[in-house]
Image (cartoon, helix red, strand yellow):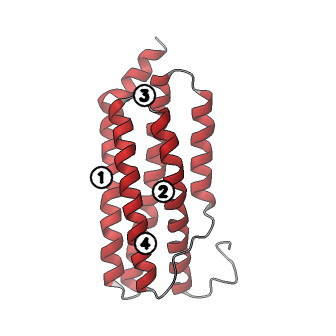
Amino acid sequence: MGLFSADIKTFHDLYIHQLEDIYYAEQQITKALPKMIEKASDTQLRQGFETHLRETEGQIERLKQVFQLEGMAPKGVTCPAIDGIIKEANEVAGEVSDKRVLDAALTAAAQAVEHYEISRYGTLITWAKQLGKADVAAILQQTLDEEKATDAKLTRLAEGGVNQKAELAGA
């Protein structure tokens, strides 16, 4: 279903499409994170990815609650944006030979994912409120708060040593 598909006729249809989009994205992220955990050499980065994997699994459960409130079975719709972000991360990671530089690349890739999720959840919260779904907005807000916290942790990791170690790799 494309953004301007005939299946999206109303604002509510658009809202549901975005729910299906982020549901798919979260599923893809749970598939990508174990690979990132395996590739990360920085202990804190690896632990951060492990924590985020558990959080993502909880976020999927929250999305299932939202679908239930909508009277729908959870389903995803292909999200070219997250597929592209993950594909780019895999390509870059495959080209990096030094583990310290790879950690910086993985951190940047994870932040790209977080920024995508932050934008989607922020939009969904606004739309849910507009549609009079305060209960859904509250559930989605929990996830948005987690995504923002993960982004902040990644920034601290990057600025607190990951990027400096990567810079030293080429020296």
Few, some or many residues within 10 Å of mark 3 (<14, 14–19, 20+)? some
Q: SS for tag 4? A: helix
Q: Which mark is first along the chain, 4 or 1? A: 4
Nearer to us in this view, 7 or 55: 55
Few, some or many residues within 10 Å of mark 1 (<14, 14–19, 20+)? few
Q: Where does the image place residue 120, in percent across and percent down from the top left? A: 46, 65
Disc nearest the viewer among 1 and 3: 3
Q: Where does the image place residue 36, in percent across and percent down from the top left? A: 49, 40
Q: SS for tag 2? A: helix
Q: Which mark is first along the chain, 4 or 2? A: 4
- Reading the image, the residue beneath label 4 is 63
Q: Please state which amino acid type lies under the numbered disc 3.
A: Ser
With 6 as the anchor, is 83 left or right in this view? left
Q: Please state which amino acid type lies under the numbered disc 2.
A: Tyr
- Reading the image, the residue beneath label 3 is 41
Disc nearest the viewer among 1 and 4: 4
Q: Which residue is found at the position 39% from the left and 44% from the top?
A: 49
Nearer to us in this view, 90 or 129: 90
- Reading the image, the residue beneath label 2 is 116
Q: Which residue is found at the position 60% from the left and 40% from the top?
A: 90
Q: SS for tag 3? A: loop
Distance (Cα) linking label 2 and label 4? 16 Å
